[in-house]
Amino acid sequence: MRKGKLIIFSAPSGSGKTTIVKRLLDKDFKMEFSISATTRKPRGEEKHGKDYYFLSPDEFRTKVKANELLEWEEVYTDKYYGTLKSEVERITNKGCNIVFDLDVVGGLNLKKMYGNEALAIFIQPPSIQELKCRLEGRATDSPEVIQQRLDKAEEELTYASGFDHIVINNDLESAVLETEQLLTKFIND
């Protein structure tokens, strides 16, 4: 059985990355979402084992020490995100293409590990001001957290050139179409 290819999506929080990934999972790309581990609290209807593996900071650090993560990052103090090795094995053993929704550092680290076996796409907001509007529109974070995310976004945008492709999400439908075309080419090569 052919092992699946790796498709990495990274972006500043609020860029539309997760929305685009969810739309692509409905398409016929034989893809499965790699569920990340995180120490942040669930938002809205998010479920453990479906949207993320929600762990305490201590549980996460224990997995790091046990070398159970392929990549991980402390994005904010005690706010960890990472990819469990067991999750990658679960998907690759089925021959599915794997979709990763990662922070920019994790995305670049995974791309370095897998090289041409992975396609790394950076989803970029049209502007920081638009990003602020999107984050405020979510109504899930305090003004302090929104400012933290905007400060982080400024830094994350400096990593964009390290990705295979940059998709500017000014219009969701156009961004989804552009990523579909990138995936079709990558999967069929």
Image (spheres, rainbow, N blue to C red):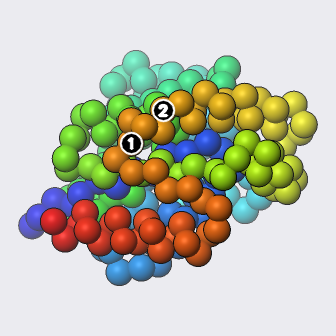
In percent of width and height, residue 159 lies at 48, 32
Left or right relative to 150: residue 117: left
Tag 2 residue: 159
Amino acid carrying label 1: it is Phe
| Residue 164 horizontal/vertical position (percent) | 34, 47
- The one of 117 and 165 positioned closer to us in this rendering: 165
Residue 101 visible in rendering: no
Q: Secondary structure at mark 2?
A: helix
Image position, residue 115 (x, y; %): 21, 41
Q: Quadrant of residue 189?
A: bottom left
Question: Label 2 crowding class (10 Å Cα cut-off): few <14, some 14-19, many 20+?
Answer: some
Helix, strand or loop at label 1? It is: loop
Q: Nearer the viewer, residue 54 or 153?
A: 153
Q: Which residue is mark 1?
A: 163
For residue 59, side relative to residue 166 (left or right): right
Q: Which residue lies at the image location 56% right of the left edge and 56% below the top edge?
A: 168
Quadrant hosting residue 109: top left
Q: Is residue 138 above or below residue 141?
A: below
Q: Amino acid at mark 2?
A: Tyr
Asked whether the residues under the numbered discs 1 and 2 touch, taking CB atoms below 8 Å apart as contact, a structural biologist would say yes
Circle 1 residues within 10 Å: few <14, some 14–19, many ≥20: some
Which quadrant does the N terminus fall into? bottom left
Residue sitting nearer the eye, 161 or 60: 161
